[in-house]
Image (cartoon, grey):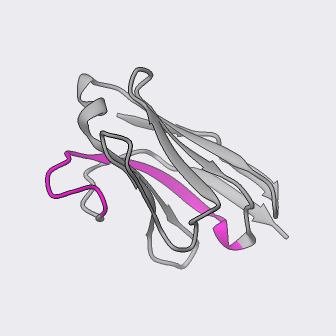
Amino acid sequence: QLVESGGGSVQAGGSLRLSCAGSGYWYSSYCMAWFRQASGKERERVATIDNGGGPTYADSVKGRFTISRDNVKNTAYLQMNSLKPEDTAIYYCAAKEPSFGCDNDDYNYWGQGTQVAVSS
């Protein structure tokens, strides 16, 4: 089970940190990722992190977002800085077994989503 928190409303240029709490002993070995879906748009993979902590980022968020994980706390994070109105979306945490890599869309465990709204 994955539970996101930390969403909210912020002005452009502001910051938010999303958290994703996972339950179960398997969490520390899995790939973790953040996806987002804006109204009327397709879901976008924002960032991934493997069980060794290696991250990947979508071009649209590189240099502004940072994904991290704490395997002791079974929690993944997405630090979002310099937020833009186009970052407005529902953000979803996801997990998958590390087979075939983490930098893809083949995630099969999902959280319920948390809303992020950025105003200009």
Residue 78: percent from left, percent from top: 56, 47
Residue 107: percent from left, percent from top: 27, 55
The residue positioned 34% from the left and 34% from the top of the image is 1
Q: Is residue 101 magenta-colored?
A: yes
The residue positioned 74% from the left and 70% from the top of the image is 85
Is residue 88 placed above or below 115 in the rendered structure? below
Left or right: where does residue 118 sit relative to residue 66? right
Left or right: where does residue 105 sit relative to residue 71? left
Relative to the observer, which residue lies in front, 63 or 85? 63
Q: Is residue 94 magenta-colored?
A: yes
The residue positioned 61% from the left and 63% from the top of the image is 63
Relative to the observer, which residue lies in front, 107 or 31? 31
Is residue 90 placed above or below 53 in the rendered structure? below
The residue positioned 32% from the left and 46% from the top of the image is 50
Quarter of the image with the C terminus is bottom right
Left or right: where does residue 99 sit relative to residue 86? left
Magenta stretch in the rendered image: 86-103
Residue 104: percent from left, percent from top: 29, 65
Q: How many marks?
A: 0
